């Protein structure tokens, strides 16, 4: 087994940075405004993004919603102050546009509250005036869920970033919904704990948005979904009522478990303002290995053996194909760690409390993989820098694809055995449709990567530009394929405005009708994140 040495870059001392970040509010405000400026410059350099309303011509602005006027703005400013509002067109652009430059709204006002009470007053007023509103966290949605469709007011949560409490015995953390996931994880690291989820967007996404979209991520195999780790929520309903369910109890069998309604609801029935979440102890011994394989059958065999041989210490099992890896290497400097390229790569992480024990188990597993011909080559990280670099490839796939001219992104759940069949079928389907395979074809490539441990594949169709010939071939063909194999059209990215009309491929008419009934009951005026999540036609 080869050992690869990586160059170590100097970094700030983490503890010192987070001391100043949390205890000097003026520094926090400066950093947030600096980040917004950087984001603004990024969007100013990007090519113009078509309005979402133009891409989805079947949508029409609801006549029941009031148009924002100066009196409304004056009221909002009386609540959040001038520092809590953005109105100039340049400042609005990063909030109106998603990070992929695929969706763009037309909001003329961004509100940034600091407290739950301010959110309550804003929602009460919007409900009374019938002003539509879009809740927004880190704006890392992949389905257009966090930006307006028309001129809805944007309520951005980034100033609600306070850690409220932490119990070092139970590992229960309570915080505002606007805390950035990576900031929370690093803060917990100083106390020997970690967040139960990890995402490629962790440096930007917020915990409230993670919960509102029921984000899955890289640690789901070990720690489960947010439906299990979230213990309580503070939610503001559309009429301004504050639903205080900030429980820190592992067991509570009294009445309906109402928090579950809001996990994965994408801000359509309430805005999450506070979070109570169970955090696991940070493992003392972490190992990461990267293996090269020649077939998807070998990927499945490697996973079966990992569950058997590594069992209680297995914390992640990720895969990507060679096409994904080529996209990554086009955009990021990369030192090859294997002698040749392989059709598939798997990244295995183990986390435990006894390094000697874990090293022995991983070594035995890797020897079996090589001896039996399941894996052809591999590397094992020897320190934290190498661990970070190996994970950097997996985390960087999404960002690399975002640098391509255009990409159609799909996040589906299907039986593991069908993952590669689905990918190959899509390649064949696009070739038959005349859009893939030739030099002048609009489709550049079809790539796949994802979480083998939970049957979630990220299927990406890379194109020279957004092209209706391509999108018409993909949809609803892909969703029909997924439904035929008892899968889900959205494993972890949500529905937003990109998939809501296809919900029928994963849910029965009776289930959709019940969802609509619940939406109308909690948001009778339909002001929260309208035009999304549920079918509009």
Image (spheres, grey):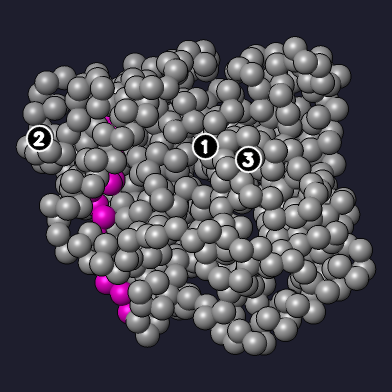
Q: Which residue is mark 3?
A: 328
Q: Point out the tag, 1 or 2, that comes first from the N-terminus.
A: 2
Segment colored magenta:
153-167
Viewer-nearest residue: 488 or 470 = 470
Identify the residue under disc 2. Answer: 82
Horizontally, residue 389 falls left or right of residue 48, namely: right
Kind of element beneath mark 2:
helix
Which quadrant holds the N terminus? Answer: bottom right
Quarter location, residue 47? top left
Q: Which corner quadrant holds the C terminus?
A: top right
Badge number at residue 142 = 1
Q: Position of residue 219 (x, y in %)?
A: 57, 63
Question: Magenta stretch: dominant SS?
Answer: strand
In the displayed structure image, the side of residue 441 where residue 166 appears, left or right = left
Task: Choose the circle earlier in sequence order: 3 or 1.
Answer: 1
Picture coordinates of residue 109, whole percent (x, y): 23, 27
Position of residue 496 measured from the top left corner of the image (x, y, whole percent): 50, 35
């Amino acid at each position: 087994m080869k050992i690869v040495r990586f160059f170590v870059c100097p970094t700030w001392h983490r503890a010192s940075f987070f001391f100043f970040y949390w205890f000097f509010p003026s520094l926090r405000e400066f950093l947030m405004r600096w980040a917004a400026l950087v984001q603004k410059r990024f969007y100013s350099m990007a090519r113009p993004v078509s309005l979402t309303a133009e891409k989805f011509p079947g949508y029409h602005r609801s006549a029941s919603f009031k148009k924002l006027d100066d009196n409304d703005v004056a009221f909002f400013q009386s609540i959040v102050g001038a520092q809590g509002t953005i109105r100039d067109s340049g400042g609005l652009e990063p909030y109106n546009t998603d990070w992929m430059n695929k969706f763009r709204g037309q909001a003329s006002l961004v509100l940034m509250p600091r407290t739950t009470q301010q959110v309550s007053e804003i929602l009460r007023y919007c409900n009374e005036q019938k002003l539509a509103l879009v809740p927004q966290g880190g704006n890392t949605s992949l389905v257009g869920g966090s930006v307006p469709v028309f001129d809805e007011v944007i309520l951005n949560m980034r100033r609600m970033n306070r850690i409220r409490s932490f119990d070092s015995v139970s590992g229960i953390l309570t915080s505002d919904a606007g805390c950035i996931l990576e900031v929370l994880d690093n803060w917990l690291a100083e106390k020997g704990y970690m967040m139960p989820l990890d995402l490629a967007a962790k440096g930007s996404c917020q915990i409230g948005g993670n919960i509102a979209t029921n984000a899955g991520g890289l640690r789901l195999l070990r720690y489960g979904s947010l439906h299990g780790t979230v213990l309580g929520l503070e939610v503001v309903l559309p009429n301004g009522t504050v639903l205080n369910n900030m429980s820190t109890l592992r067991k509570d069998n009294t009445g309906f478990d109402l928090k579950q309604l809001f996990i994965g609801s994408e801000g359509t029935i309430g805005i999450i303002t506070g979070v109570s979440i169970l955090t696991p102890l940070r493992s003392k011994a972490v190992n990461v290995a990267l293996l090269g394989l020649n077939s998807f059958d070998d990927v499945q065999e490697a996973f079966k053996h990992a569950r058997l041989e590594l069992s209680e210490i297995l914390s992640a099992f990720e895969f990507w194909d060679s096409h994904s890896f080529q996209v990554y290497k086009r955009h990021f400097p990369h030192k090859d760690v294997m002698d040749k390229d392989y059709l598939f790569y798997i990244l295995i992480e183990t986390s435990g409390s006894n390094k000697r024990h874990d090293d022995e188990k991983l070594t035995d597993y890797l020897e079996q993989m090589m001896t039996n011909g399941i894996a052809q080559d591999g590397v094992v990280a020897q320190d934290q820098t190498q661990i970070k670099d190996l994970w950097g490839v997996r985390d960087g796939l999404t960002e690399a694809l975002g640098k391509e001219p255009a990409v159609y992104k799909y996040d589906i759940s299907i039986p593991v055995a069908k993952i590669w069949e689905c990918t190959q079928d899509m390649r064949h389907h696009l070739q038959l449709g005349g859009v893939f395979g030739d030099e002048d074809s609009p489709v550049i490539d079809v790539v796949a990567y994802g979480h083998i441990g939970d049957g979630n594949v990220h299927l990406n169709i890379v194109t020279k530009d957004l092209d209706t010939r391509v999108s018409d071939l993909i949809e609803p063909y892909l969703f029909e394929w997924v439904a035929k194999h008892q899968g889900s059209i959205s494993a972890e990215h949500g529905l937003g405005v990109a998939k809501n009309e296809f919900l029928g491929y994963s849910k029965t008419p009776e289930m959709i009708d019940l969802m609509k009934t619940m939406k109308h009951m909690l948001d009778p005026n339909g002001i929260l994140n309208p035009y999304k999540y549920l079918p509009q036609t």
